[in-house]
Amino acid sequence: MSLPTENDSLDTIFQAAAAQIDENYAVEFMKQISLMGNDNNALGFATAGSSGEVKIANRIAEEMRNIGLSDVALEEFPVDAWEFTSASLTITSPFMADIPMTLSAYAGSVGLPTGIDAEIIDVGSGAVQEYKGKDVAGKIVLASFDFLKDYWVGPVAHQAELKGAAALIATYDGDSFGMRPDALNSFDGQLRPAIPVLNMSRKDAEHLKELLHKGPVTARLSAIINLALGQGKSHNVVGRIPGKNDSQYIIFASHYDGYFNAFVDNRFGVATTLALAKALLEAGYQPEKTLIFIAHGSEEYGVSASHYDWCIGSWHAVNTLHTEWAGNTFAILNTDAVRPDTPSFVCNATPELHSFMQQHMEELPSPPSPPYTKPSEIQGLNGPWSDDFNYAIKGIPAVLCGLGPSQWKQGSYHTQYDNYANEYMGTIPAIQKYCISNYIQMCMALDAMALAPIDLSSALLELPTTLIRETIAQSECSADDLMSSIAKAADEARNFYVLSMELNAMYNRISSMDAMLTDQQRDVFRKLKDSIADYNHNVLSAYKLLQGDMKKINRWDLVIFGHEMAQENYKNLSDAITALEASKPEQALQLMQTIDSTVLVPYFEKEVYEFSGLQVFDQQRSDLYWGTNKILPQLDTYDVYKAIEAKKAQGTTNYSAEIHELRKMLAFEAELLADTLLEETRLSEQIRALVDTNGLHEAIQLGKSMLV
């Protein structure tokens, strides 16, 4: 008999759906919800549990119903609600300003219910040394620093709190964020709920510094903010297109909360996801798997006084609200802050999907130019900077498309310039249509598969490249068993992927013959389906072991293998000891700053370091969310660093006491490294067992018997 090919069938279905993409609908909807924000806030804002977030969530749910999605629901989860209404600074001396300076605020900041009149003190970079000789008790402090190259705002705010400041106004140095002179900015602050922490534009800050240079300045500071600790509710908005299989899923995700008007970040993502759903529905697409459409709340911020204070809605989605998604979802296709000016269309995908993604990208049409002037790229997982990370570490393969180098990010990201009246509106509709087409095509390819296209081999083979054999030998550890286990697991995983793709093709051929199957053949096909379901569960379980358990994050939230943290600490501690033995304290101090959170020690008091460098990473805390079991124990280096620093200033050359302390830390890291290498060996053996190919060979033979 003559059977249609899988590609011909998919292409026909794809073209029908692509023809229904309505970019005007997408742009108009993102504009509409970008103009919704907190009550009485001229800047917009719609963060965790705020009035703006509630309004937008309800509007998205309404629109999901309007376009025909099923089972639309607002799914509630707890947050420390944060409602920013307004903030301003009005100079009162040496003159009375006619117009107040408009300020922004960092998420998690407390407010000033009645405002204050106080002197302003410039504390430079906000480090503890900058306070020397300055009385800031009850006053407003102004700090200027580079968020990426110096430190985040949390430690600066804590330092100001300890010095008795009534409020902190932060502004930016360097080229990290908010590069436009009059841009206001906001981020999650990782803040203690103690003093107001506000943001001032570079232009206003320069004006204020000029006044301060001439003499004392006093001002009226107002900050209308409500932080409701433990009292807030946020929502994920969920709809679906039911599939023939109601227990397997493909998820389309975005987040709808945001700072200012949040046009690109991320009402773009919400509108893209809904326009995609609308196109599929209008094309009459009947999926095999159930398609989930979710707009997450509280991505930008969700909890107070936590290092892991963002991506809270997505954490709840897979950890408390829909635990059934893990192990049964072929992929999450996320859209977040698509860059409107990056030169390449970039797909960030978990490495285990790269083999599938390579083929997918080759079949895509060329992206629109402008803005895309260079070839498209596949890069690694974006990490915890977007909601898909929470899914990946629960065992759901993750994709995020549209990132890349961008002037938009430096100038407009998280500022009042992220609005519908931006300079990129000429290209945004074409970008949006391409993103939708990309995900529709990817969805249909995944939907046609019986087995998730997971190739674990590349991610496994990445591990040996991160081992520093000299350091491991110096620590008297061994990676031989790990290397052997990884090699065997990678071989088995690659074979599993190749056989999976063969089985997928065979499954689709048999499915296309469904009307012609005999009763006996249907019984065999059901048996084959049951076997495939087991293999799919196994490979997704193996994926979870790799991304959720073997991969960790360091103190700076970069995704790495666990041994890399202990290995790096061991090497730098060893080199610091060698430097001290050679009476080179400056070199030793520089090396120590690479160890865990020691980089904070030279700039802040011990209490700040202990909170931001140690306590927030304590695995006994209940507010770790996606940081749970992802970070190794942190060394407390404060006292020994300060002791070396003091002796260096005194000209002392005897560092025996400090070397003794560092050797104790070295022994701890050696033991931690040994334990981590052993754990990675155990996990790789479990992964190998889960991707054993014997059963796949049997399933392929069973399928072939039906095609004879």
Image (cartoon, rainbow, N blue to C red):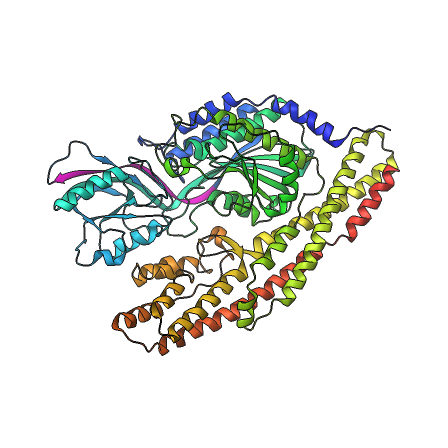
**Would you say the magenta stretch is mainly helix, strand or loop?**
strand
Q: Position of residue 636 (x, y in %)?
A: 39, 66
Q: Is residue 242 visible?
A: no
Task: Decide if residue 702 is in sight here.
Answer: yes
Q: Is 168 on the left or on the right of 477, as rendered? A: left
Q: Quadrant of the N terminus?
A: top right
Residue at 26% x, 40% y is: 223
Q: Quadrant of residue 470?
A: bottom right
Residue 163's x, y, as percent? 23, 56
Which residue appears farthest toward the left when viewing the image?
A: 94
Question: In the rendered image, which quarter contains the C terminus?
Answer: top right
The location of residue 258, given as percent across then percent down, is: 41, 36
Image vertical order of residue 538 relative to residue 602, above or below: above
Report which quarter residue 101 is drawn in.
Answer: top left
Q: Is residue 653 above or below residue 283?
A: below
- Residue 84 counted in the magenta span: yes
* Most foreground residue, 537 or 215: 215
Magenta region includes residue 76: no
Residue at x-position 40% and y-position 77%: 660
Report the span colored magenta. Answer: 77-93
Count the marks: 0
What residue is drawn where x is 49% and y is 51%?
626
* Residue 102, position as x, y percentages in the image: 25, 35
**Which is more toward the observer, 644 or 267?**
644
Q: Is residue 602 rendered to the left or right of residue 233? A: left
